[in-house]
Image: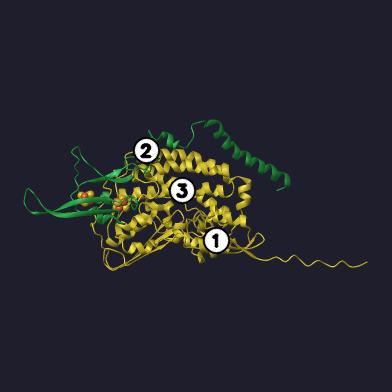
Chain colours: A yellow, B green
Amino acid sequence: METATIAPPIKSEEYFINMGPQHPATHGVLRLLLTLDGEIIKKVEPDLGYIHRSIEKMCERNSYQQIIHLTDRLDYLSSHINNEAVCLAVEAALGVEVPERVKVVRTILDELIRISSHCLWWGVMGMDLGALTSYFYAFRDREMINDIFEETCGARLTMNYNVPGGLMHDIHPNFVARTREFLAHFKTKLPEYDRLLTDNVIFQKRTKGVGVLSRQDAIAFGASGPVGRASGYSCDVRVHHPYSALPKVTFKEALRTEGDSFARYQVRIQEMWESVAIIEQLIDAIPEGPHQVATDAVIKLPKGEFYQKVETARGELGVFIISTGTKNPYRLKFRSPGFSNLSLLNHIAVGGKIGDLVATMATLDLVIPDIDR
Amino acid sequence: MSYFTEIYHGVKTLLTGMRVTGRYFITSGKSAITQQYPDNRASLKMFDRFRGEVVMLHDENNEHSCTGCQKCELACPNGSIEIIWDRGVDPETGKKKKFIDKHIYHLGMCTQCGLCVQACPSNAIVWAQKFRKTRSTTEPS
Ligand code: SF4
Ligand code: SF4
């Protein structure tokens, strides 16, 4: 009998595909250049710059009051926290101590916007993985927060409510009642989030063990926020360098050790609970007092370098100001959490499937204007 | 986990999730969460502080309280406010005085930051809550 000749193995070739810049799973104008072998990812290269607006450069020609409204446009889902970062840096440089009332209101609003940001993330995360329902439920709850912001600050996303030395207006008379109403509502809805998505078997299978980031790598890549904490890296600025009213409150830093997409998911869900706890500690005792201390109409920082970091919903945002004593900064640099968190994408996505990349992207929770600036 | 326990467990979690959606399906009825926006235009009221557009208040004699101090122009980060002024003679004192000729607000450039309204010393400009800046051709203006 003749021996059958063994057919040569099918020759596979790597190929290249664009994900984005207009892809729903990149949540913005981010272009990922994927090198694939079949469905296996060999390389992910992010290509940035589609929404670059030279915000840092614009800051150099703006006064310190005007810079704040530009930070709304970095990570627009944490805009209030971004505003606060600049204000804290300017206040520290001027040596201005803001009233207690301002500190408490700032922290409450910080946590509210963190919940709202995580709500949006939770909704689109479900949507990315094929569960459209979560999107509507999250937006229903987020709407209440947006209303609180609209009533007190005048805008829903880009509020520009912080000014150096305090707040633009005092809080609205309805603020406390509305916030309490939201907390009561939200505490009944959060368990629903778990029943709907967290416990879902399909969801768990798609996120557990996907996009694993080790603690060493998290530190090496400069990961911060929920991404770092899911890998067991305790990096919460609110815990290690508390600002505003945070020294007065007690809360637990959400930490996991698995480092996979599901861990990042769980960290954010827990953070929502912690944020609720922080607001509850503050909302009943907002101190009376002025909502602003007067600063000069033209703010001139003393000569020197000033740095302030805060914890946004995505991680550590740093503001670095170099002042030469004039009314504009000589140079202003933002250390944005999204940029560092994106840098590790190639590391954790290689070897996985395209479908896993979507889950990984969703749990990194990138906001593209924050990366591009 | 054995094969069958896994199936049982999977079906159970799916049903738990469906109970949540099912409850809303039955209980929420027509009281949907969203607003029926274009239909509720007549009754829709924005919050007082909502930043729609900057307007200059005029009283019943069609007079405003703007002094032409240009503070809003200076406060604006992007040049959305332009003040064209002229020098004239104050009829009462006979001294030279700055008069405001035109106060131009470029809505298209405005980022709704609110700095101009904060800066105005005479409360001449305020926020209007109008957010709809277009008009359909079939509507009366
Ligand atoms: S709201 Fe801001 S951008 Fe708009 S005109 Fe006033 S200062 Fe300028
Ligand atoms: S700040 Fe007020 S008073 Fe001065 S020019 Fe502007 S609108 Fe007029």
Taking A198 as reference, is A100 left or right?
left
Q: Position of residue A71 (x, y in %)?
A: 38, 56
Give the residue displayed 27% in from the left and 61% down from the top.
A94
What secondary structure is marked by label 3?
Answer: helix
| Dot 2 and dot 3 residues touching (CB under 8 Å) | no
User: Marks 3 and 1: in contact by CB < 8 Å?
Assistant: no
Q: Determine the residue positioned at 63% across, 59% down.
A: A352
Q: Do labels 2 and 1 share a chain?
A: yes
Q: Nearer the viewer, mark 1 or mark 3?
A: 1
Work out whether mark 1 precedes mark 3 in sequence or the reverse, and give the earlier one: 1
Q: What numbered label is drawn on residue A32?
A: 1
| Percent x, y of residue A173 | 32, 39
Residue type indicated by callout 2:
Ala
How much space separates mark 2 and mark 1, taking CA atoms? 45 Å
Does residue A201 appear to the left or right of B124 in the view shown?
Answer: right
Examine the rendering and report whether any part of residue A61 can be seen. yes
Respond whether the residues carrying marks 2 and 3 are from the same subunit: yes
Residue ID for mark 2: A177
The secondary element bearing badge 1 is classed as strand
Task: Indicate the amino acid at tag 1.
Answer: Leu
Residue A243 pos. (x, y %): 37, 56
The residue labelled by disc 3 is A274
